[in-house]
Image: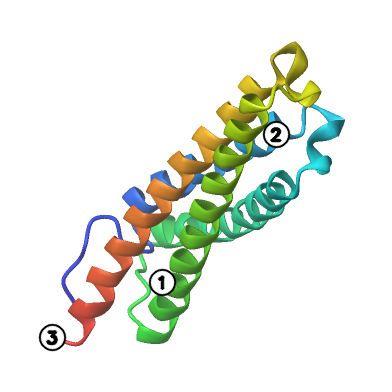
Amino acid sequence: MERVPGSFGTSVSFALRIFQLGFSSASLISMCVDYDFNEVTTFCYLVVVMAYVILWSILQTLADTYSVFMKQLPHKPRVLSIVLAGDVILSFLSLSGACGAASAIEMLLSIDAPMCGDNLCIKYYVSALLAFLCWALFLDSAIFNFMSLSSLFY
């Protein structure tokens, strides 16, 4: 098997997971600073997706930590397929949550909604931006794992 630098079980994958965990946690925290976020459905969707992303990133970080310290890379196609599927699914979910939140913020700002008082929409913008960054890291991880999975078959 050709060792792909960012694939599951490597130190680059560990770094990707740590940053995913950081960005998703920061996105969740900046969205939940106000109790009115649950009035907008897309904000609730982003919060739920970021909660799933945090759980997935914690599990994958633990698995990467074990692989890096024990120097054992997972060579099984089934394991890499599950990790790839999880990364792709959560990548699409985080992208849709970030796009939905960003468009809802633009709509709220265009109608001068009272919900955006006290610069709360800026915090919502930050949350959407962090979700976009989390999506980019998930996409990178999915590409690396896809290259690693395809190298198993050649």
Whichever of labels 3 and 1 marks the residue nearer the N terminus, that label is 1
Residue 43: give x, y in percent of width and height: 70, 44
Q: Report how far apart the C-alphas of labels 3 and 1 lie in the structure.
A: 18 Å
Q: Name the foreground residue: 113 vs 54.
A: 113
For label 2, count other residues whose C-alpha is less than 10 Å away and answer few (under 14), some (14-19) or many (20+).
Answer: many
Classify 136 as above or below 92.
Answer: above
Label 2 near label 3: C-beta < 8 Å?
no
The CA span between labels 3 and 2 is: 45 Å
Residue drawn where x is 69% and y is 52% of the image: 51
Q: What residue sits right under mark 2 in the picture?
A: 31
x and y percent of residue 105 in the render?
A: 62, 33
Check the picture and name the quadrant holding the C terminus.
Answer: bottom left
Closer to us: 103 or 27: 103
Q: Is residue 89 above or below residue 101?
A: below
Q: Decide if residue 119 is on the left or right side of residue 70.
A: right
- In the picture of the structure, the residue carrying the numbered disc 3 is 154
Q: Which residue is mark 1?
A: 84
Q: Amino acid at mark 2?
A: Met
For marks 2 and 1, the one nearer the N-term is 2
Which is nearer the eye, 58 or 114?
A: 114
Q: Are discs 2 and 1 less than 8 Å apart at CB?
A: no
Residue type, label 1:
Leu
In this rendering, the label closer to the viewer, 2 or 1: 2
Cα distance, mark 2 to mark 1? Answer: 28 Å
| The residue positioned farthest toward the right in the image shown | 35
Does residue 26 appear in this view? no
Q: Residue at x 45, y 71 (%)?
A: 83
Element on which disc 1 rests? helix
Sequence-wise, which precedes: disc 3 or disc 2? 2
Q: Is residue 104 left or right of residue 14?
A: right
Q: Nearer the viewer, residue 62 or 110?
A: 110
